[in-house]
Amino acid sequence: MFDPIKPATTRMTRLRRCLVAAGMTACLGGALLGHTAAHAQASSLLENFGNIMTMNHLYSASDGQSHIEEMAVPEKLNGKLTTYFDEPVQKFTIGYWKDGDFRDFHYAGHKNLLIYLQGKLLVSTGDGVEHQLMPGTATLAEDWTGRGHTFRCVAPTGKRVCLFLQVTIADLDQAMPLRAPPTK
């Protein structure tokens, strides 16, 4: 369990050891939430290795709205290592929103990979569809224009926060072509 009294060096040592020995999501969750909670929260993301990995993709469409789709993440063989992502990053953030926090319509300013560790995030797109993003899910946010999306944190128990990992991959190219909206 996260203990603010414990010296920061002890927590950082545990974090460093964990990053080497285990998956990044479970490790960061363990350093912040406690090992038992982190294992349970990250299991849905980590248990499917060897299968096709999917994630949410938040994108802008030519109808001026943002949309979310599920997409397969391609595996790449990199020597003896199979990777899902192998890109340089600009920034790495661990953050949280409090239960009930709401952000009105906005769009991503950067290409971000978000991994949810705790709480439930309700994301609404301009087409009126609400998506529930649960712990262990990942979202690639690339909606760079139009109305954008809203979100609300729902975390009524435990630490009462929506904890997330955000990896900023790149600035969004404002000339990125808009896709056609999904057909109903």
Image (cartoon, rainbow, N blue to C red):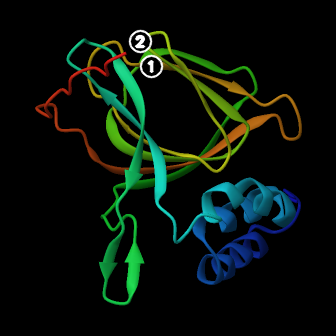
> Could you tell me how far apart the alpha carbons at marks 2 and 1 are, in whole angstroms?
6 Å
- Mark earlier in primary sequence (2, 1): 2
Residue named by callout 1: 149
Q: Residue furthest front?
A: 184
Q: Quarter-wise, where is residue 34 in the image?
A: bottom right
Q: Quarter-wise, where is residue 119 in the image?
A: top right
- Residue 14 in the figure: left or right of residue 102: right
Which corner quadrant holds the C terminus? top left
In depth, the one of 158 and 46 nearer the eye is 46
- Residue 15 in the figure: left or right of residue 179: right
The relative height of residue 170 versus residue 15 in the rendered view (above or below) is above
Q: Quarter-wise, where is residue 45 in the image?
A: bottom right
Looking at numbered disc 1 in the image, what kind of residue is underneath it? His
The relative height of residue 6 versus residue 21 in the rendered view (above or below) is above
Residue named by callout 2: 126
- Residue 171 position within the rendered picture, expressed as x and y whole percent measured from the top left: 25, 43
Label 2 secondary element: loop
In the image, what residue occupies the spot 65% across and 65% down?
A: 47
Label 1 secondary element: strand
- Residue 12 in the figure: left or right of residue 86: right
